[in-house]
Image (spheres, grey):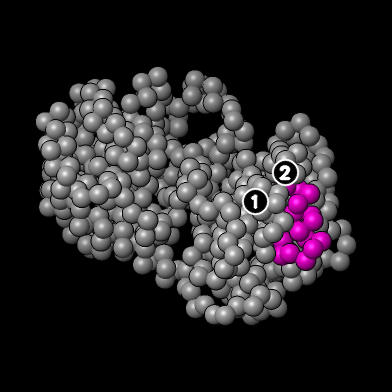
Amino acid sequence: MIKLRPLMFVGTGSDVGKSIINTGFCRILKQDGYQPAPFKAQNMSLNSFATPEGFEIGRAQAVQAEACGLACHTDMNPVLLKPTNDKSSQVVLNGKPIGTQTAVEYFMGNNKHALFEEAKSAFHRLSQKYNPVVLEGAGSISELNLKTRDITNMRMAVEANAVTYLIADIDKGGVFASVYGSIQLLDENERKQIKGIIINKFRGDIKLFEDGKKIIEDLTGKPVIGILPYFKDIHIEEEDSVSLGKKSKTSSKEKINCAVVILPRMANFTDFDVLEHDPRVHLFYTNNPLEIETADIIILPGSKNTISDLQELKQNGVALSIVKAHKNGKKVIGICGGYQMMGEKISDPLQIEGNIENIAGLGILPIETTITNEKLTEQCAFKFRDSNQDCFGYEIHMGETIAVQNNIPLCILSNGKTDGYFLNQNCWGSYIHGILDNKIVIQHLLSGFNLEQESDFNYQEFKENQYDKLADLIRENIDMDLFYAHLKED
């Protein structure tokens, strides 16, 4: 198989579709017999994933690895920033946290050189194993005030000598200015790295944009290699919280209403994607107390700052509505940080999350949690309740939780340890992300409702079909001959 040049997708701004397009090309290259692997030098996200070795990377790179048919690895995302509040982030390097920094400390400090060296090393390790490496940029390539400290966009493209495509979102408007301006603000070496432009999220008849395509090509001197249509019928897991704005926010009368409580620092909301696609369920996200009380199932999700988010729930009336729903017999479950909140008390003696050392929980489960400075990150196999069926998920959390009475674990891990707390059929909590991806857990969660239909929905098969549908859509709308000609250039 011929060795291809590295491939990179950068954007005129945030949320232009880089991650989704990267995923689609990962699947295309796999289908065409190559061995691609994803890479993003630096990612900022509260949605993360545990590698088989027990390290942490951004969820988007784990999804892209899945599209490649690979197990994920920290080399695919060597630097991960996990915001703890509006001004600070936990810095995860090669899968392990190395501390928390403010934005000023991170971007203005002298550690970006060292982090870029780590990123380069990770990329070169991948490039020796895979063909090609498919890189993803972050945000806009034209943030001039941050450019000298940027380790993710054109600096990485030049280092990798990657075939680089600029992605623009036409749905937002201003596509001519954003494309032309982004390219003009690059220096000559960076401009040479851009081999083409992809217009994304086009609505209507693409033939109507033929004149626009020519104008962009004349302005920039770069070919528009494709115009991708706006779509709603292909579902790929998204890690950016911006995607939450597209999800349902209110209940429905025709299905089982499942409410995910919106938290300011909600983490790993991809835990609930499986419910979004189950035909029996109407999933919605809300922090409206009345909507929560009327839901059939209430889920408290993970959080990057459990104590701060719990305070918010108490202040906005959501905490009271969750407790009231529980007392009225509604199903209430918690995952990770949400599990911690359901207990009697959360302690933070080292003040890792802030200056509050103790806070009362919701008092639903007889458990207490202590926040620790050790982060547990690992994939896990487990048995759910009394079942002998093998289940899988992953843990990413800082904290130890103990039962203060009647220790009734929810899961038995393959290493003999226990997880979670089972109060009754309507109430439990767990540290395991991805627990709902297991069919037996979904069956348990939806038991007790008058269901007219049983579901044989297989989430893993569903995801594989979505990757293939995305690849088909891209092939239909991209000049694939030109694409491969670029990758085969010396």
Please, which residue is most extreme toward the right here? 405
Q: Where on the picture, by quarter, is residue 179? A: top left
Q: Where on the picture, by quarter, is residue 416? A: bottom right
- Disc on res. 261: 1
- Disc on res. 313: 2
Q: Eyeballing the image, is 84 above or below 145?
A: below
User: How many C-alpha atoms fall within 10 Å of the one at disc 1: few (<14), some, or many (≥20)?
Assistant: many
Place of residue 318 in the rendered image (x, y in percent of width and height, measured from the top left): 72, 47
Contact? badges 2 and 1 (CB < 8 Å) = yes
Hey, what amino acid is under mark 2?
Leu
Disc 2 is placed on an element classified as helix
The foreground one among 202 and 239 is 202
Was residue 324 drawn as part of the magenta stretch in this picture?
Answer: yes
Place of residue 357 in the rendered image (x, y in percent of width and height, measured from the top left): 81, 36
Which quarter of the rendering shows the C terminus? Answer: top left
Was residue 101 drawn as part of the magenta stretch in this picture?
Answer: no
Q: Start and end of the magenta stretch? A: 318-338
* Lateral position of residue 233 relative to residue 245, left or right: left
The foreground one among 255 and 336 is 255
Place of residue 464 in the rendered image (x, y in percent of width and height, measured from the top left): 38, 66
Picture residue at 16% right of the left edge, 53% below the top: 480
Q: Eyeballing the image, is 383 above or below 429?
A: below
